[in-house]
Image (cartoon, helix red, strand yellow):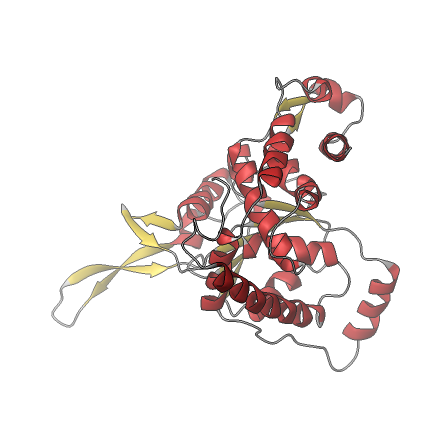
Amino acid sequence: MGVQNSSESGLDEKAVIAAAERALSDIALIRKEVAKVIFGQESVVEQTMLAVLSGGHALLVGVPGLAKTKLVATLGTVLGLASSRIQFTPDLMPSDILGSEVMDQDDNGKRSFRFVPGPIFTQLLMADEINRASPRTQSALLQAMQEYHVTVAGRPNDLPKPFHVLATQNPLEQEGTYPLPEAQLDRFLLQVDVHYPELAAERQILLETTGVHEAHAEAAITAARLIEIQTLIRQMPVSEKVLDAILSLVRSARPGNGVASTDKHVAWGPGPRAGQAMMLCARARALYEGRLAPSVDDVLALAEPILQHRMALTFGARAEGMSVRDVIAGLVRQAGG
């Protein structure tokens, strides 16, 4: 993925600016509708939106009751996407989410197999408590997330477009859970940490959600329009300075690249998929904030949600009480200094 300008993408500069201005208007409407239902949590909403606008998947990590499920349902409505929810449990089988073949018999007694699609055949899939599913079921979801089709009875079945997985994970649950393998974590564009709301937001939650009438979000765009915005984001120009900042940051998080703190504390670091995620999300963040091109600040702001689930600490670092976030914060200070 290289540095792009409007001429390389085959579009006139004026056309790109006009398309971006229209997208800015749509994104402002999306934010307005989401804010009717989700109070506070601006960074959570932003990062989840960035994942969707970039055409990827997001992992939302937080304790129960922080509106993770409500956020996903709201985004489905506001973005005009067909959505479904799967509550993951240890006994959930791949066929429960992918679908299965059933035997039909016509009036003449002729028998044939018919594929009955599972809940994964949607545009916005909420994978609730994904770490409760067995590795076998997780691997079935992994193929869908990466290849955008599922194989049943030896035949591929394409998923609808666009297709996004927004998965939730409760960090407190330990019994009956199966930690996501590194290969599956890497498929998530962002890991979004959902924290407790601020006082003012929590006050608003209590007032707005315990009365007779609750606010409801309305559709702001259609699925086809979302695909157009996703295409526009891939056409946004990225300067050499921003590209260099992405490469420098991602490579500094890997052992063996001359960064002493990383060599000491990091067992393994992010692969090229982290850089791809950074390129896309930096563009999406710029557009989300009303700008037509990303800056180095976008790269630094996205470091934690993009890198934290793609790194592992050494035993010594964990024994010292360090976290992956501490390491990333140090790299960001170094890059910004």
Name which residue lies at 63% across and 54% down.
Answer: 286
Residue 303: horizontal and vertical position, in percent?
Answer: 67, 39
- Horizontal side of 208 relative to 193 (left or right) equals right
Task: Please give the name of the residue rendered at 65% of the width and 52% of the height, measured from the top-left corner.
Answer: 47
In this rendering, would 67 be left or right of 210?
left
Left-right relation of 141 to 263: left
Q: How many marks?
A: 0
Residue 127 visible from this viewpoint: no
What is the residue that sits farthest to the bottom in this orientation? Answer: 212
Q: Give residue 75's quadrant in the image.
A: bottom right
Q: Is residue 139 left or right of residue 49?
A: left
At horizontal 75% and vertical 35% (from top left) the residue drawn is 336
Task: Say which quarter of the image contains residue 279.
Answer: top right
Nearer-the-camera pick, 221 or 65: 221
| Residue at figure coordinates x 72%, y 54% from the top left | 43
Q: Is residue 108 visible?
A: yes
Residue 276 location (% of width, % of height): 52, 40
Relative to 186, residue 293 above or below: below
Q: Nearer the viewer, residue 291 or 312?
A: 291
User: In the rendered view, would you say 143 is above or below 26?
Assistant: above
State the image coordinates of residue 108 (x, y, percent, origin top left). 11, 70
Quadrant of the rendering where the C terminus is positioned: top right
Front in this rendered view, residue 39 or 250: 250
Q: Position of residue 169 (x, y in %)?
A: 64, 47
